[in-house]
Image: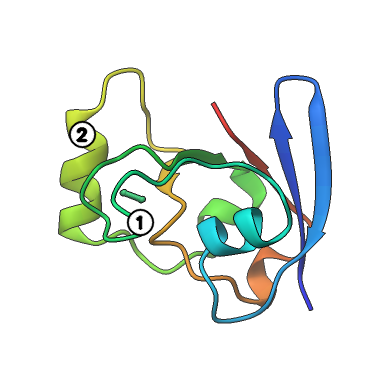
């Protein structure tokens, strides 16, 4: 069961995530609030998070639609992903995910 550390400002929470759920689901199921305006449909961009650089390259490639949403947001760079589009796997064990 992968452990993910969520950071939001000075708040830090380590949670047990389940393979196959999204990062958004893992956060919210464990009481870490990430707003998901479209409820995980991947169209609103409100769930963007910053993935730690040691894990980013191990994630499945970003889809064109996710890239389009992130490109439309200001103040994002290549370390951002949509929490509702990143599926938890063992590759995320120990990852630090920042909620901007
Ligand atoms: S919840 Fe809307 S893009 Fe993730």
How far is the residue under mark 1 from the one under mark 2? 20 Å
Q: In which quarter of the image is the C terminus?
A: top right
Picture coordinates of residue 53, whole percent (x, y) = 60, 43
The picture places residue 82, in percent across and down from the top left corner, at: 39, 49
Cβ at disc 1 under 8 Å from ligand 1: yes
Quadrant for the N terminus, please. Answer: bottom right
Q: Which residue is drawn at 47% across and 40% down?
A: 35
Residue at point 76%, 71% (across, down)? 2
Image side of residue 10 versus residue 32, left or right: right
Which residue is at 80% across, 28% downward?
Answer: 11
Residue located at (84% from left, 51% from top): 14
Label 2: element kind: helix
Determine whether, in the image, residue 59 is placed left or right of residue 46: right
The dot on residue 85 is none
As drawn, 56 above or below 35: below
The count of marks equals 2
SS of the residue at dot 1?
A: loop
For residue 8, what is the image quadrant? top right
Disc 2 crowd rating (10 Å Cα; few below 14, some 14-19, many 20+) is: some
- Which callout, 1 or 2, points at the residue further toward the start of the chain? 1
Q: Tell us which disc is closer to us: 1 or 2.
A: 1
Q: Please tell me the numbered disc located at residue 71.
A: 2
Identify the residue position indicated by label 1 in the image. Answer: 39
Residue 58 falls in image quadrant: bottom right
Relative image position of residue 61 (x, y in whole percent): 35, 64
Find out whether the residues at labels 1 and 2 contact each other: C-beta distance under 8 Å.
no
Of the pair 37 and 53, the residue shown nearer to us: 37
Q: In this view, does 50 lie to the left or right of 6?
A: left
């Amino acid at each position: 069961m992968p452990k993910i550390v969520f950071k939001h400002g000075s708040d830090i929470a380590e949670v047990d995530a389940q393979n196959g759920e999204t990062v958004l689901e893992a956060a919210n199921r464990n009481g870490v609030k990430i707003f998901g305006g479209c409820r995980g449909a991947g169209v609103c961009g409100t769930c963007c998070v910053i993935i730690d650089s040691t894990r980013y390259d191990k994630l499945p490639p970003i889809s064109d639609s996710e890239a389009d949403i992130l490109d439309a947001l200001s103040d994002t760079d290549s370390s951002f992903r949509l929490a509702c589009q990143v599926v938890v796997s063992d590759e995320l064990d120990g990852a630090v995910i920042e909620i901007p």
